[in-house]
């Protein structure tokens, strides 16, 4: 009788531990899945630094493919074998590809007031049905940027596109 009770308690304890671990492994509730910038900072930044700086310095784009110095032909396989799994591989690859294709203009032109683009997006912007809005004013970012620091229409488009891309990387479905 005591053995049966002890065995039942052990089973319940194991099930409870598994359930707790599953809940802890889930992404935070809300708008997003795993924030790619958090993922990079958690898994990659200690060795590789900031994702944008890394992609612009160590990766290149050939056609529409991202290439590394060591894994020229299959950067996907490298990422899969380097602390990423499942759908994270394609997502991080696409993030690095976008960064390698873009100049670091936000860092050079906006960071003195708005910190990093990721922090700015997380604290000040939100995506609603694919459109980026200011949390503060509730206005679409593209409307606001049209009157911000005398930006020309090409600059407004560039920064709206960059901020929207980063928001999609942060607030992943």
Image: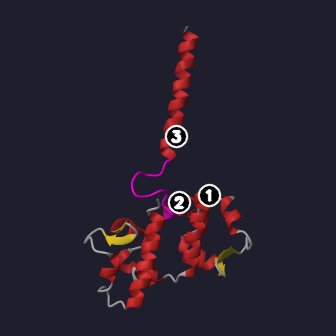
Residue count near mark 2 (Cα–Cα under 10 Å), binned few <14, some 14–19, many ≥20: some
* 44 displayed left or right of 108: right
Report, in whole angstroms, how far the alpha carbon at label 2 lies from the one at label 1.
9 Å
The image position of residue 15, as x and y in percent, is 53, 30
Q: Residue at x 71, y 75 (%)?
A: 69
Discs 1, 3 touching: Cβ within 8 Å: no
Instruction: Tell me where residue 48 sits by quadrant.
Output: bottom right
The image position of residue 150, as x and y in percent, is 32, 91
- 75 up-or-down from 86: above or below: below
Q: Secondary structure at mark 2?
A: helix
Report, in whole angstroms, how far the alpha carbon at label 2 lies from the one at label 3.
18 Å
Q: Secondary structure at mark 3?
A: helix
Quadrant where the N terminus is found in the figure = top right
- Magenta-colored segment: predominant secondary structure: loop
Can residue 139 be seen at all in this image of the molecule?
A: yes
Discs 2, 1 touching: Cβ within 8 Å: yes
Q: Residue at x 33, y 69 (%)?
A: 124
The image position of residue 95, as x and y in percent, is 55, 70
In the picture of the structure, the residue carrying the numbered disc 3 is 21
The first of marks 2 and 1 along the sequence is 2
In the picture of the structure, the residue carrying the numbered disc 2 is 39
The first of marks 2 and 3 along the sequence is 3
The region drawn magenta spans 26-37
Query: Among all residues in the image, which is located at the extreme front?
Result: 129
The image position of residue 66, as x and y in percent, is 65, 75
Residue 84, numbered circle: 1
């Amino acid at each position: 009788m005591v053995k049966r009770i002890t065995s039942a308690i052990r089973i319940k304890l194991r099930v409870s531990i598994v359930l707790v671990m599953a809940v802890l492994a889930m992404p935070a509730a809300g708008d997003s899945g795993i924030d790619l910038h958090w993922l990079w900072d958690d898994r990659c930044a200690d060795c590789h630094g900031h994702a944008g700086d890394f992609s612009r310095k160590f990766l290149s784009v050939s056609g529409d493919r991202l290439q590394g110095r060591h894994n020229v032909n299959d950067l996907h396989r490298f990422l899969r074998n380097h602390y990423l799994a499942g759908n994270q591989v394609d997502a991080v690859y696409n993030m690095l590809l976008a960064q390698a294709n873009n100049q670091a203009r936000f860092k050079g032109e906006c960071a003195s007031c708005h910190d990093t683009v990721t922090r700015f997006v997380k604290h000040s912007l939100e995506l609603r049905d694919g459109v980026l809005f200011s949390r503060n004013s509730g206005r679409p970012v593209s409307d606001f940027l049209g009157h911000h620091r005398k930006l020309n229409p090409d600059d407004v488009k560039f920064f709206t596109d960059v901020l929207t891309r980063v928001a999609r990387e942060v607030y992943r479905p």
